[in-house]
Image (tube, rainbow, N blue to C red):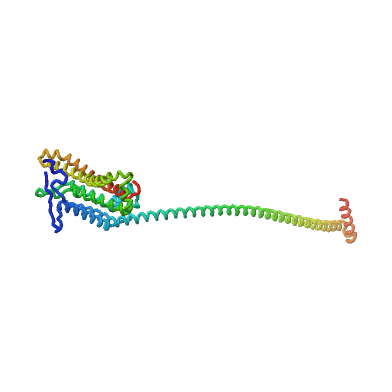
Amino acid sequence: MTHEAPLKTVDFGLFSLTFNLSTVMMLLVAAVIVFLIAVISTRNLKLKPTGMQNFMEWIMDFVKNIIKSNMDWKTGGRFHILGITLIMFIAVSNLLGLPFSIAYDHTLWWKSPTADPTVTMTLAAMILVLTHYYGIKMKGTGHYVGTFFKPMSFMFPLKIVEEFANTLTLGLRLYGNIYAGEILLGLLAGLASTGAMGFIGAIIPTMAWQGFSIFIGFIQAFIFTMLTMVYMAHKVSDDH
Amino acid sequence: MFLDYLVLGAGTGFNGGDIVSTLVIFLLLMVLLKKFAWGPLMGIMQQREELVASEIEAAEKARKDSHQFLEEQKSLLKEARTEAQSIVESAKKQGEVQKEEILTAARNEANRLKESALREIESEKEKAIAAVRDEVVSLSVLAASKVLSKEISEADNRALIEETIAKAGEAR
C-alpha cells in the first residue's frame, strides 16, 4: 500500500534542493497535455468557430464570468490568462491520477500532481503573493496597508491570520480532495486485486468513485480559480 | 501505523525542488499558452466582437436608410396620385367642353343643311310651277287652235287664252 517517493537531492553548492521526481514528471505531463490541448484547439482560428475552438472559447467565457462575478472587467481582465491557465492546469492535473497509478519497485511514479501538498501549497502561495503584488501595484502602498485596518483597527491580527488561513485552505482543500480520491481508488484497487470475488465487488464502487472523482476534479479546479479571483478582488477592488 | 502515510508531509519532508519546479512549470506554461494559444484566441474573439458590432451598426444604418427610402417613396406615390387625379379631373372638364363644342357645331351644321334644303325645295317648286304654267299655256293653245282650226290668228288666240287663264287664276 505505502509507496516510496522517488526523492533526489541536487546540490547547488550553496544550498541543496530535494526533488520528488514523480511530482516533477507529473507536473510536466500535465503541462504538456494542457499545452497540447490548447494549441491544437487554437490552430485554424476562425471567426465562425468550429469544434475545439468552441470548447476553448467556452472555457474563456467561463473564466471571464468568474472574474466578472468578482470585480470589474477593467481591473480583472489582466487575470484572464492566469485564470484560464489555472483552471485547465488544475483540472488536467486532478484527472491524471484517476485512470491508474503506476508504482515501480515500490516507488509511486504516476499520480495526480495535485495529490502532493507541496504542489498545491506552492500554487496557493503563488496566488497569495500575486494578490498582494497586484494590491500594492494597483491601489498603492498606503491603500494596501490600510486594508489591514479596515473596518476597525483591532481587526489587524485577524486580517493577518486571514491571509495565512486563505493560503492554507486554498492549497489544502485541493490537496485533500484529490489525495483522498486517490487513496480511496488505491484501496478499491487493492480490493480488486485480492481475488475474483474482490474484483467483482470492487467494480461498482470503483466506477462510482471514478465518476465522482472526475466531478470533484473539475469542481476543485473551478473552486481554486474562483477563490483566486475572490482573493484578488479583495485586494484590487475598491470596496468589498 | 495503517494511517501513518496519510499524515501531511510524512515521508516526503521539505521538497524545495518541488516548489521550484511547480512554480517554474506553471509560469512557463502560462507564458507559452499566452503566446501560442490564449493570445491568438483572444485576438480572434476580439475581432469577432468588433465584426459583430460593425455588422450591427451596418444593419442599423441600412434599416434607417430603407426607412427613409420608404418615406420618400410614399410621398412620391402620394404626389403621383394627386397629380393623376388632377389630370383626370382636367381631362374630364376638357371632354365636357369639347362635347359642348361638338354638339353646337353639329346642331349648327344640321340647321344650315336644313335651311339650304328648304331653300332648294322652294326654288325647285317655283321652277316646277313655272314649267307647269308654260306647259298648260302651250297645251291650251294647241288644244284651242285645234278646236278653232285656224279661224282666229294665233296672236288673238294667245291673248284670249292668257286672259282666260289669268281670270281663272284670279277666280281661284
The quarter in which the N terminus of chain A is drawn is top left
Q: Residue A26: x, y in percent?
A: 17, 51
Left/right of residue A157 with respect to residue A99 in the rendered view = right
Please identify the quarter of the rendering in which residue B122 is found: bottom right
> In the depicted view, which residue is nearer to us: A171 or A36?
A171
Q: Position of residue A230 (x, y in %)?
A: 30, 47
Residue B142 falls in image quadrant: bottom right
Whether residue A220 is visible here, answered yes or no, is: no
Image position, residue A173 (x, y; %): 22, 44
Which residue is pictured at 16% across the width and 48% down the height? A111
Name which quarter of the figure residue B5 lies in.
Answer: top left
Number of numbered callouts drawn: 0
Establish if A63 lies above or below B154: above
Question: Is residue B94 visible in the rendered structure shown here?
Answer: yes
B37 left or right, relative to B120: left
Q: Residue at x 28, y 55 (%)?
A: B38
Residue A200 percent across, percent down from the top left = 13, 39
Furthest-front residue in view?
A154
| In-front residue for pair A218/B50 | A218
Q: Is residue B101 above or below residue A195?
A: below
- Position of B143 with respect to A2 (left or right) is right
